[in-house]
Image: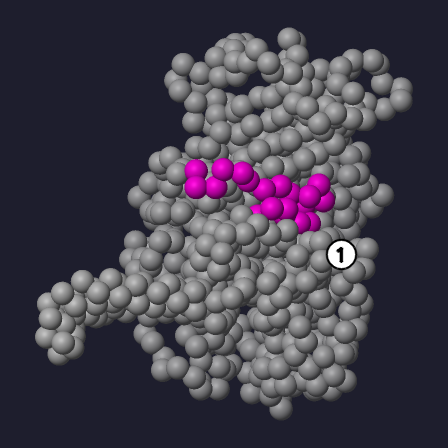
Amino acid sequence: MVAIVLVAWSQARESVLPTPANSPVAEKPLIIGCRIGFSNHYKIGHWTPVWVDLDGTADSENAQIEMTVPDSDGVETTVVAPLASTGGNAAPHRPTTTPFYVKIGRMAAPIRVSLVIAGKEADHLTLDPMASPQHPSVFQPLAVSSELIVSLGGKAIALDNALANRDAEGGRVARRVVEIGRVDDLPDQWFGYEAVDLFVLSASDEKLCRELSGDERRLAAIRRWIELGGRLAVLSGGHQANELFGNHSPLAVLLPGMLVNSVDLSDTTSLEHFAGVAEPISEYDRSRTPLLVPKLGNVRGIVEAYAGRKPTDLPLVIRAPLGLGEVSFAGVDLAVEPLVDWSGRADCLRAFLRPYVSAGDKADTPQTLGTLGYNDLAGGLRQQLGHTFDSVTTITFPLVAMLVVGYLLLLGPASYWIARHFGGRPEIAWLVFPLLVLATSGAAYWIGLVSKGDRARTNQLELVDVDFTSMQARGTYWAALYSPRSERFDLGLDVRLPAHATLANHEGVERIVSWWGLLGMGVGGMQAGGVDMAVINAGYRFTPPLDAMLGVPVLTSGVKSLTARWTAPVQQILDAQLRNDDGLLAGSLTNETGDTLTNAHLLYGSLAYRLGDLGNGKRIEIGQNLDPFRVHTFVTRGARGRDSTGKGELDRGVFLADHASSEQLLMLMMFYQAAGGEEFARLPSRYQSYCDLSRLLELGRAILVAYPSSEGSQLIDHATGRPPGDDQRRTRTVYRFVIPVARSD
């Protein structure tokens, strides 16, 4: 199989990449390989890791790698990375690998990799994900809404049998399960996992786990990804636990508790019940090979399966929050006897992963979508932000039709009336007609200028999440940039936090600015087929830190949709002392943000508490004095344009994304599952699904939702630091504070 891929690669280079006579490309290719994503699986519309392999003869001090890919509008974008250094002790001409990250916007678009030395292209490689049958491609682009499950050690437990790959047929979500065979094939930056829906780590492959434990950079990237909303599933039996997850092991930070020891699981009834199968685990000689399982102490989170009389005796399946994400732990090794021969092994694995994967026996997406041009809530948010702008008038079809009728009336009856009543001479029409044409043309030109506005405008929306366990803030920013004339922009992001939090220019702030694509196969969708019209010939570039885009083109009266993610350390900006009091929330909360938080609500479990406006320094007691109502009611009312008191728009029986405002759509994205998911929304929410914190409510976290009075983050010109077009319109911002709650048990 490897030989076939190498032969196909060689043929593709010879046929797809002819070398012009005046090309500076070397006779011997310097680019000897390229890997994209996870085992060459990658999602469009997400940041994706890339590794470019060179033969080692390039001058690393004057060389860089450039990768050019299209964005969702078909405009070329270029990401630049300096050539990886071989190190002072490395052998000369030793092959090197340069890692970097790209965001691909089209399924079938070619990908160009270039080696640039001293400003000149020395070699290039074009990758075609949709290659012809004569030159098959090993790269497999996945749709934005596909489900991507990445596993390390999953082959030993037959993960691909429990969760089979499938295509998007019959309304189901497409799924790909990708097994990683080397730790070096994992990203070393947290946003490289942006496309991953679930990461599965199985200790059955002890070699891979030891490699990950020794790779500090990649392990830190995984943990940071989880803290910023990722999901990790860990499986480990007792045989591997002491070595891999002991208290002094780097992997111990991924466990929802502290490893105490390994014990023999003598009664497997709880495991069979968790799997939901009637077939018992077969008997075997435990005196020779005991079924060892790890025992965790100081467990945090929810225990779903356990052996013994109470959950703390021997927890087997634990789900716990880690920052804004989630870690699930199963203390079993499904690759050893007698579990390896157990007929319910696949059912047990599916039960363990059920909260994070879509169903397999029915359609996942409702087919009653009454929307215009998109098939995801994020698409609706994108359309709403780019719909109208201040001082910009949309010329509708009825207005155009009325003006055309008026124009015909002027050229016909009005021209005749003027010729008859001013001199009674028909020749006057030769003068009246061109004057009317010039006057109406000038009026049309003036209306066009006035309707387009006089400068660039932006609509902005931001969601800021602050986690009180890791003391980190995560921001998600969306914007639509309108330009009245054809222009290029250098775009960055000015991150702003409450007055008593981290300063915006703090060195710990990390920004990733990029374009924002539309889901679906319609016009402008990232999965749309056809050929681009090449309206814009020259593309734009990302800065190497990915914190800005330079030369972003916007056509006359055009709109460019943008998004950004940022992270920053924060100080203690809320004094929250909360506890669980027989299922209800109790304690106190003090606002120390330096800002007024308006329309505040505190969510816990299935209940929501209305707090009103919290001025800076205000303390509020949480208890029986507050009358809680359901979280479902809070979210669905907000999504329908009603506040928690029921005031606002008339309640509609069906939520319609086409009629919802951007704030209403964001409310639904923030707690999608708590609102009832697709049954309520009539649309999936898979793109940017990390915005949904419903699982944290189920895992025992309290979430304060409020609206700050201060300014949110702002789209700026990267060079001047001022908003594009000097548009000072305020960013609409929503804050969510994720707060731990003490439990009596």
Q: Give yes or no for residue 541 being in the magenta stretch.
A: yes
Q: Please, is residue 345 above or below residue 700 in the view? A: above
Residue 611 screen position, x and y as percent: 62, 84
Q: Main secondary structure of the magenta part?
A: loop
Is residue 257 visible to the viewer in this orientation of the structure? Answer: yes
In this image, 40 relative to 263: left or right? left
In this image, 251 relative to 709: left or right? right
Image point (78%, 69%), residue name: 501
Q: Bounds of the magenta span?
A: 534-552
Residue nearest the observer in this picture, 581 or 208: 208
Residue 160 screen position, x and y as percent: 50, 33
Where residue 125 sits, quadrant-wise, is: top right
In this image, 491 relative to 520: left or right? right
Q: Please, is residue 214 above or below residue 682 in the view? A: above
Q: Give yes or no for residue 351 being in the magenta stretch.
A: no
In this image, 122 relative to 37: left or right? right
Q: Amino acid at mark 1?
A: Val
Residue nearest the observer in this picture, 356 or 296: 356
Residue nearest the observer in this picture, 161 or 643: 643
Total labels drawn: 1
